[in-house]
Image: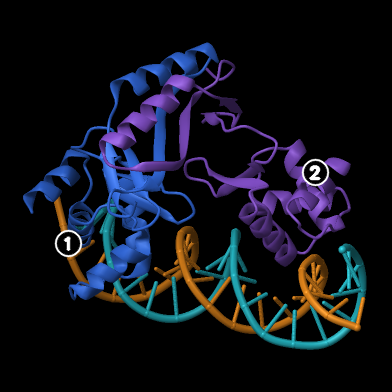
Chain colours: A purple, B blue, C orange, D cyan
Amino acid sequence: MNKYIDWLEQKNIRVTANKTAILEVLDKHKHLDAVQISSILDTQNTHISQATIYRVIAELEKHEIISKLNFGNEHSVYEIQCAESHHDHLICLECGLVVEFTNEKIEELQLEIANSKGFSVITHSLNLYGKCSKCN
Amino acid sequence: MNKYIDWLEQKNIRVTANKTAILEVLDKHKHLDAVQISSILDTQNTHISQATIYRVIAELEKHEIISKLNFGNEHSVYEIQCAESHHDHLICLECGLVVEFTNEKIEELQLEIANSKGFSVITHSLNLYGKCSKCN
DNA sequence: TTTTCTGCAAAGCTTTTGCATAGCT
DNA sequence: AGCTATGCAAAAGCTTTGCAGAAAA
């Protein structure tokens, strides 16, 4: 509860029930798009207008409390970013399972490659698509 | 010219002027979305209805002649896939420059990671976002 | 009190679909 | 001839915006 309020206050964002409700949904069910967030809130009898959902998401993303991810063909999905370290994703194309991972060597190699092409890296996204152990 | 016809024939797709025109645009200007393809064709006095552009893109993607890419916030863009080996992308957040690269070690590490999580990898996408040498 | 947030309804964009005609093989 | 492709217009989705009233600091 207070966790979400803390995140907002740390970024000097006005605290409202809508914002904490959206953060709570995203914290419990990761990797949701705006429409899914809306649906889950409706299920919980916490209806929030779509306009507000989009506005809140945009603000949270701007302040780096949540981050936008692209998993292949679908729409962008969001996950909590603050209080979490960077990670990459393994996505099961069969059942949709998402597993997070980090790998130091890959991060290093990425910097080397960027360097060799004259790029400085600000961020990156690495998604591995395949089948999880259950779907194989 | 004939290159595009060959690609289509190899996949048993009916050859039409619209399809070869769209392939030609994508071959010359990489990483375009549907609207950009439409605009470029209009510039060349080769108007193709949007419905057709979307239908052709979908068919070309389904047959793996082109592939869809997500570069961060924007819409999906497309690039020629057939006759090109897999590669990853460095994207300049300032000027939009896209540089392609491949790295054997990263590919190997990806397989190792996936293995350790019980995943088999079908495909992957690795995008490095930053600033190119000109924009730094 | 002042600023920001919110809902509603409308508008904007991108993408998809139905249907009749045109084009490829 | 038979099957697929195409254009047009309409529909469907998702996202954004204007505005007036509500809530937070």
Determine crowd level at label 2: few under 14, some 14-19, many 20+ residues with C-alpha closer than 10 A.
some
Q: Would you place residue A88 above or below residue B7 in this image? A: above
Do the residues indicated by labels 2 and 1 lie within the same chain of the protein? Answer: no
Front-most of residues D15 and B51: D15
| Residue for point 68% across, 47% down | A65
Which residue is outermost to the front?
B136
| Residue for point 38% across, 30% down | A110
Amino acid at dot 1: Ala
| Residue for point 44% across, 14% down | B112
In front: label 2 or label 1: 2
Tell me the residue that label 1 is attached to: B17
Front-most of residues A27 and A38: A27
Give residue B119's mark. Answer: none
Across and down, in percent, residue B50 comes to 36, 68
> Is residue B41 found left or right of B35 in the rendered image?
left
Tag 1 subunit: B
> Is residue D15 found left or right of B70 in the rendered image?
right
Work out whether residue B87 can be spotted: no
| Residue for point 32% across, 57% down | B32
Tell me the residue that label 2 is attached to: A24
Work out whether residue B3 can be spotted: yes
Amino acid at dot 2: Glu
Q: Quadrant of the N terminus of chain B?
A: bottom left
Tag 2 subunit: A
Front-most of residues B135 and A25: B135
Alpha carbons under labels 2 and 1: distance apart? 52 Å
Corner quadrant of residue A60 = bottom right
Identify the secondary structure beneath mark 2: helix
Identify the secondary structure beneath mark 1: helix
Q: Would you place residue A88 above or below residue B13 in this image? A: above
